[in-house]
Image (tube, rainbow, N blue to C red):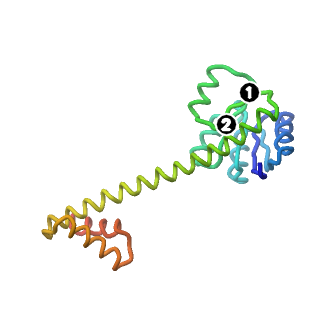
Amino acid sequence: MGGQRVVIVDGDAGWRCHVASLLTRAGYRVVEEAANGIEGLKAVRARQPDVVLSEVNLAGMSGFELARTVQEDRLAPVILMSGSYDLETLERVREVRVFGYLVKPFDEAVLLPAVEVALANFQEFLRLDRQVRELRETLETRKIVERAKGILMEKLGLTEAEAFRRIQKTSMDKRISMRAVAEAIILTYEI
């Protein structure tokens, strides 16, 4: 709990104040509070918090819509809050895949662990997301290099090893990626 930045979105000013008080006493920094979903989204974009706590039922934009937007843009983990517990709400919470769901009223013994778990899980989510993107990029590069090797083997009569070595050497000589060399080969021979 080292001063992480929090945005609270709730139509009930008294509840926002209560949650802000709990968080502030625990060392978090409440950087902004908003009364509706649209203001909440603006606050999240402007203040770039580490975590967002949002009521489910908001004017202008529901907490579900807010959470979906914030999480699709990978801005922060969202913990949704609701004054009631019912299966329909729980199902919607699952669909949005938020990082936490709290039923009001709650105290700091419930709030603080939820915030810490959301922060930790969001960092792991970002790490895994980066890893997936890197793996996709690696796979795509491998496919392009394989295609270029095939072209060199067919057009120039090279072996697979010779074609790979030619791409690799050109990459090093010109100081560009093997993918860029492979893409140039593909463009050159497939026109």
Q: For this rendering, which residue is in front, 147 or 67? A: 147
For residue 66, side relative to residue 187 (left or right) = right
Q: In x, y percent, where is residue 148?
A: 25, 64
* Identity of the residue furthest to the left in this view: 157
For residue 172, side relative to residue 28 (left or right) = left
**Quadrant showing the C terminus:** bottom left
Where does label 2 land, which residue?
A: 61
Callout 2 secondary element:
loop
Where does label 1 land, which residue?
A: 103
Q: Residue at x 52, y 48 (%)?
A: 128
Q: For this rendering, which residue is in front, 165 or 100? A: 165
At label 1, the amino acid type is Val
Callout 1 secondary element:
strand
Q: In x, y percent, where is residue 162?
A: 20, 70
Above or below for 105 versus 25: above
At label 2, the amino acid type is Met
Q: How many marks?
A: 2
